[in-house]
Amino acid sequence: MTPTRESIFKAIDEEREYQDGKWGLTFDRKNTVNDWVTYICGYACGAAPLEFHRGVFESNMRKVAALAIAAIERVRDDGTIAPRHYDTHKGYPIIEPQPSQGIRQPLAADGFFDEDFSYNGD
C-alpha cells in the first residue's frame, strides 16, 4: 500500500471514530436504506461546488467513504436495517443477489416491485 493510500485510509478510519462518537449505534440503528443513501449523496454533492476547493472536496469525500462503511457495518451487525414506512418487514431483510439474477430479481423476490420496478404493494 502506498503512503498516500495509507494516510487516506487512516483519515477515513478517524472519521468513522468521530461519527461513532457523535451519533452512536442507537442512532445508526434507526437509519433506513434511504437515510444512508441521502447522507452519502448530501456529502458527495457538497464535494463539488461550482468553484473547486481541495479541502472541501477531500473533507466531503472522506465523510462519504466513512458513511458508506458505517452503512455496511450496520447491515452486517445483525442482518437487518431499519424499515422504511413502506416496508412490510420488521427490519428490512437482506436479499443476496444470485449470479444469474442481475439487479432486478432481488427486488422482485420480496413482492414489493415488479420486474420493471413498478410498485405492486398496497
Image: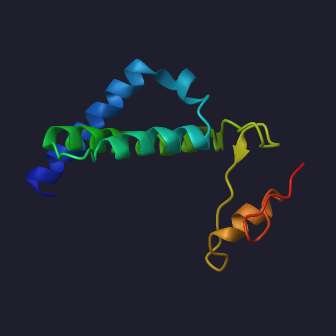
- Residue with the most extreme bottom position: 100
Q: Nearer the viewer, residue 100 or 51?
A: 51
Q: Position of residue 113 (x, y in %)?
A: 78, 61
Decide: is 101 above or below 22: below
Q: Position of residue 69 (x, y in %)?
A: 42, 44
Q: Is residue 7 left or right of residue 34?
A: left
Q: Quadrant of residue 79?
A: top right
- Residue with the most extreme left position: 3
Q: Position of residue 5 (x, y in %)?
A: 17, 52
Q: Which residue does the image show at 76% across and 71% down from the upper left?
A: 115
Q: Which residue does the image show at 44% across and 45% down from the upper left?
A: 41
Decide: is 49 above or below 107: above
- Residue with the most extreme front position: 50
Q: Which residue does the image show at 26% across and 44% down from the upper left?
A: 49
Q: Nearer the viewer, residue 56 or 16?
A: 56
Q: Quadrant of residue 92?
A: top right
Q: Position of residue 6 (x, y in %)?
A: 16, 48
